[in-house]
Amino acid sequence: MSKRLAGRTLGISPFYVMELLRRAKQLETQGKDVIHMEIGEPDFATPETIVEAGIRQLQTGEVKYTPAAGLPELREKIAEFYQQRYSVTVDKKRIFITPGASGAFLLALGASLNPSEELLMADPCYPCNSNFVKLFDGKARTVAVNADSRYQLTAALIERHWHEATKGALIASPSNPTGTIIAPDQLKQAIHTVNALGGCFYSDEIYHGLVYGEKASTALAFSDNVFVINSFSKYFGMTGWRVGWLIVPEEFVDATEKLAQNIFIATATHSQYAAIAAFDPITLAELELRRAEFNKRRDFLYDALLGLGFDIPIKPDGAFYIYANCAKFTDDSFQFAMDLLEAEGVAITPGKDFGLHEANRYVRFAYTTSIARMAIAMQRLERFISRG
């Protein structure tokens, strides 16, 4: 280790899928057709209404800094959205516009987490979440979860793993990689348990909107004493615009604003103006059509994988992932994913990107490509596993 390199970087885990993605790009340059089911990015273009709003702002030439907390108009739109969609009232001063959900996590943890304090989260989970904790010299304490809890932390699990150094708990619903939603009563109990223990509750809601049955509940329906992280990337299709939001408890407003002023100054101005158009009725109507298409894709892929022999104990409720047990075919899901790419040009994500719990038994499929392309991928996958 270089003496000039910060020690905290050693605890930051890489994205293993990036090795696979690099190889996929190499194969494509060699003329191989690769079907991408590894990256969690919608394949739809950003809705035209949003693009046009961003262009209009750029054309004014007035692309200046906004307030650190974000455009007042956008914060007001988000507050209205919570009232309309969830029947929840949120004071817009508690809403902060951030450079994607990643920026929201940085502000939330920067305002609340001290060095050596622990944050409970599910295993499997999105890997960046634990890395954000490590960046602030905190400790990510992952809790193994299975189908019996819908791969979600429960109040009982939180209480069982809570100890003196624990600062709080994070729940993602719908989750990445499993796509499961925590039931409203379970979410309420988890929040009340954390609050009773004197901790902080963090709710990752970036896949809200991309649900295919019962709607996901926001943590704000049960308490104002929560951090809520959301984004315009997934449901709204604005990944590259890098704009998200964070809602904080009242006591954290001033601290969060100071952090935003110093870390980001402000989220990209044209992206914020574009995001205002995300709430236009015409935009929301288009997004609902896209949600319906993702629903069809989920059903197609779920049935196809079951037919091939993969074990999927719970049909995903939302997001655009299926976390499938591939133990019938391999005891090393990373090598399975690499071999599948080399042999058949199908790119998927190995379980080791999402934690340690049975990671070698699982792979994640993202249905962020068309049913026609997924059908070809399933033919290739069947051919691959039939060769043993």
Image (cartoon, rainbow, N blue to C red):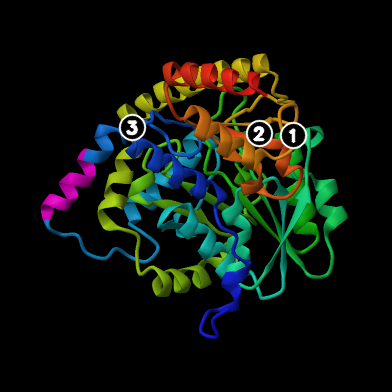
SS category of the residue bearing label 1: loop
In the image, which residues are magenta? 52-60
SS category of the residue bearing label 3: loop
Q: CA distance from mark 2 to mark 3?
A: 37 Å
Q: Nearer the viewer, residue 250 or 122?
A: 122
Q: CA distance from mark 3 to mark 1?
A: 41 Å
Per the image, the residue denoted by label 2 is: 180
Amino acid type indicated by mark 1:
Arg
| Circle on res. 31 | 3
Residue at 28%, 39% in the rendered image: 50
Amino acid type indicated by mark 3:
Gly
Q: Answer left or right for 316 relative to 69.
A: right
Q: Is residue 33 magenta?
A: no
| Circle on res. 254 | none
Place residue 148 in its image quadrant: top right
Q: Do callouts 1 and 2 mark residues in contact (Cβ within 8 Å)?
A: yes
Per the image, the residue denoted by label 1 is: 150
Q: Residues within 10 Å of mark 1 (few under 14, many from 20)?
A: many
Q: Residues within 10 Å of mark 3 (few under 14, many from 20)?
A: few
SS category of the residue bearing label 2: loop
| Closer to viewer: mark 2 or mark 3 | 3
